[in-house]
Image (cartoon, helix red, strand yellow):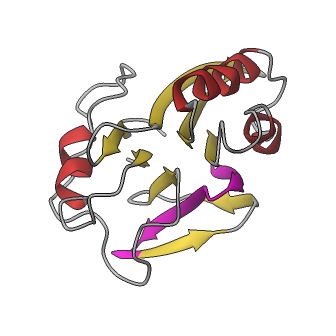
Amino acid sequence: MTHSSYGAVVHGPPGNAASTVEARTLDGARVIALIAVEGDLATPSLESVKGALARLAHGTEAAKLAAAAPPPPFASGVAVVLLAGDHAHVATTGGGRCYRERDGILHELGAGAHDLRSGDALIAASQASLEVDRRFFTTAVEPSASEEFRNDTLDDALESALEGYSTSVFAVAAARIG
C-alpha cells in the first residue's frame, strides 16, 4: 500500500453522518481502516468504532469494528474496510455498504476478504447510495508523492465524484491503492 491516497468526507447538508481514515500497526504491519457511519448519533458511534480499532488484535477483524457501533437509530449504517497487506477486509451493518472500483467500474463488496491490486479504490459508505457498474472517481487521482500517511489526499476527488448524487446526507471513506 505504499504511496496510496486516502480521504473521508460527508456528502450533503449537515446531518447525522461521519467518516474517517485511521492507521494502526497490528502484527508488525500497517493497517488502514476506512470507516463510515450514519445515524442519530453518528459522531459518538464513529468514536465507538475507533475505540474498537484501538483494541483490535488483527487486521482481518472488520466485523468486530462494525459491531462496535450502537444499534439503530443511533448508528443506522456502518461500513468498515480494513486494508491489511494485499487484502481488504469488509464488514457492514444496517444500511452501510462497501465498494471497490477496479478498472474504472464500481462494484459492491460483500463481507469478508477481497484481494487488492494497484489502482483499486476501496470505499466505505454509510448507506447504499453509490451507483455500481460505472466509474466512481470522475477526476484523475494521482498517487501520493510521499510514504507519510495522510488521511485527506483523496478528499477533493471524493467531493468531485459525489457532485452528481442527491442531497441526502451520507459519509464515505476511501483509499486509492498506489
Residue 132: give x, y in percent of width and height. Answer: 44, 78
**Picture residue at 84% right of the left edge, 23% below the top:** 57
What secondary structure prevails in the magenta region? strand
**Picture residue at 68% right of the left edge, 27% below the top:** 49
* Residue toward you, 65 or 94: 94
Looking at the rendering, which quadrant does residue 106 occupy? Answer: bottom left
Q: Is residue 92 magenta?
A: yes
**Picture residue at 70% right of the left edge, 16% below the top:** 51
Residue 92: give x, y in percent of width and height. Answer: 70, 53
**Picture residue at 51% right of the left edge, 75% below the top:** 107
Whether residue 85 is visible, yes or no, is: no
Check the image and report above or below for 164 versus 75: below
Q: Is residue 68 magenta?
A: no
Check the image and report above or below for 42 versus 126: above
Q: Which residues are magenta?
A: 84-105
Check the image and report above or below for 65 versus 99: above
Whether residue 14 is visible, yes or no, is: yes
Residue 69: give x, y in percent of width and height. Answer: 73, 33
* Residue toward you, 70 or 107: 70
